[in-house]
Image: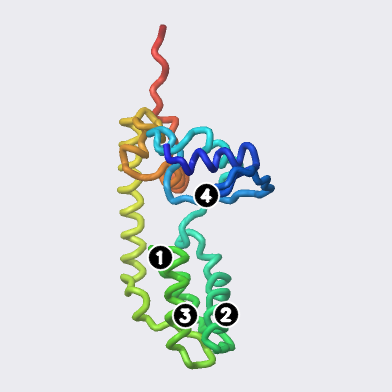
Amino acid sequence: MPDTQIALLRVLQEREFERVGGTEAIRVDVRLIAATNRDLGEAVADGSFRRDLFYRLNVFPVEMPPLRERIQDIPLLAEYFIEHYARKAGKAFKRVSKRTLNRLQSYPWPGNVRELQNVIERSVIVCDAEEFTIDDCWLPTRPPADSRLALSGTLAAHEKAIIEDALRACDGRVYGRSGAATRLGIPRSTLESKIRALRIDKSRFRQPPANS
């Protein structure tokens, strides 16, 4: 186990630490907020993350969906980033074009909030009008609406079938070395989110206990 995990666990348990090279214990009173893009439950199962540290950190877990599933947040995030980078560039925009706002909310944002931030920063630099706009070249062109809807439905059905096959092979287990998340090669939190979104009933795939 990495020494850092042990050191952090000690701080959380005893609320004290020692400086590098020091011998005096320093008391601390902090509230820790941790974030990860890994499935820590799986990391605990494979031994790469301490179980006791996991439960110390996992007091109030919050799962953050990707930006494409939070389009209602995009206007507020865009407004914040526009004001931030406009201030740095010494610019002032009176409004955001409606077309730009619609474009931001319809784009899938594979790079999540960081991609949105980068697109707005670049656009602030090149935009010299009173109305803030984003050049279409910053965002890839999308297929026609009807094609998108048909493709979305096809992909969702295909994804659901793959997940159900994995759950069936794993007797409904999601995590652990023999779980569906490991079989599919994705974090447990991601799989749980997809199971909810696709309305998959995990209990259908659990094997009943053998009769004694």
Residue 195 visible in the current orientation: no
Q: Please state which amino acid type lies under the numbered disc 3.
A: Thr
Which sits earlier in the primary sequence, circle 4 or circle 2? Answer: 4
Which sits earlier in the primary sequence, circle 2 or circle 1? Answer: 2
Q: Please state which amino acid type lies under the numbered disc 4.
A: Glu
Mark 2 falls on what kind of element? Answer: helix
Q: Nearer the viewer, residue 1 or 62?
A: 1
Residue under the point 34% across and 67% down: 146
**Residue 100, numbered label:** 3
Which sits earlier in the primary sequence, circle 4 or circle 1? Answer: 4
Image quarter (top left, top right, bottom left or bottom right) of the N terminus: top left
Q: Nearer the viewer, residue 150 or 189?
A: 189
Say few, some or many: other residues with alpha carbon within 10 Å of mark 1 (under 14 / 14 to 19 / 20 or more).
Answer: some
Residue 154 visible in the current orientation: yes
Mark 3–mark 2 distance (CA, rounded to whole Å) = 15 Å
Position in image of residue 136 (x %, y %): 37, 81
Q: Please state which amino acid type lies under the numbered disc 2.
A: Glu
Q: Which residue is mark 1?
A: 108
Residue under the point 37% across and 78% down: 138
Q: Please state which amino acid type lies under the numbered disc 1.
A: Pro
Mark 4 falls on what kind of element? Answer: loop
Position in image of residue 101 (x %, y %): 50, 77
Q: Nearer the viewer, residue 210 or 38?
A: 38
Q: Which residue is mark 4?
A: 63
Mark 3–mark 4 distance (CA, rounded to whole Å) = 29 Å
Camera-nearest label, 4 or 1: 4
